[in-house]
Image (cartoon, grey):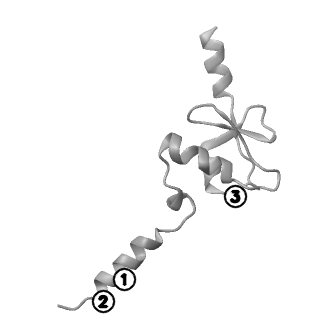
Amino acid sequence: MAEQVVADKLKLSDAPKKLKSKVWQYFGFRDGSPTDKAKCKLCFTDVAYAESGSTTNLMQHVKPKHNVDLARLRGRTSATTEVASQKSNSISV
């Protein structure tokens, strides 16, 4: 019985190429076709996402549950880090 559950969880297909957000690397679809829910590849939880393509719910799942850095997923560095770096570079001794 437990082996069947594991086997079912491993049958996740990747998100279609048209779904471009990097958060999709953590989600897939059980039957291979997108629905209104994606399955987390890390904990196998179903997470709803908007048909409009919004991935906010997906990001809000992986950040606290799996400690995923959302700034890295979005392809940007922290604005605070950039400002701090600029300030330290402009300080003269």
Residue 40 drawn at (x, y percent): 63, 37
Q: Where does label 3 land, which residue?
A: 20
- 73 vs 40: above or below: below
Q: Where does label 2 land, which residue?
A: 90
Q: Callout 3: helix, strand or loop?
A: loop
Find out whether the residues at labels 2 and 1 contact each other: C-beta distance under 8 Å: yes
Depth check, front residue: 38 or 88: 88
Pointer 2: residues within 10 angstroms few (<14), some, or many (20+)? few
Q: Label 3 vs label 1: CA separation?
A: 31 Å
Of the image marks 3 and 2, the number of the one nearer the N terminus: 3
Q: Where does label 1 land, which residue?
A: 86
Query: Where's the N terminus, which quadrant?
Result: top right
Residue 67 drawn at (x, y percent): 47, 46
Give the number of the mark in front: 3 or 2: 2
Q: Label 3 vs label 2: CA separation?
A: 37 Å
* Three-letter residue code for mark 2: Ser
- 40 vs 77: above or below: above
Of the image marks 3 and 1, the number of the one nearer the N terminus: 3
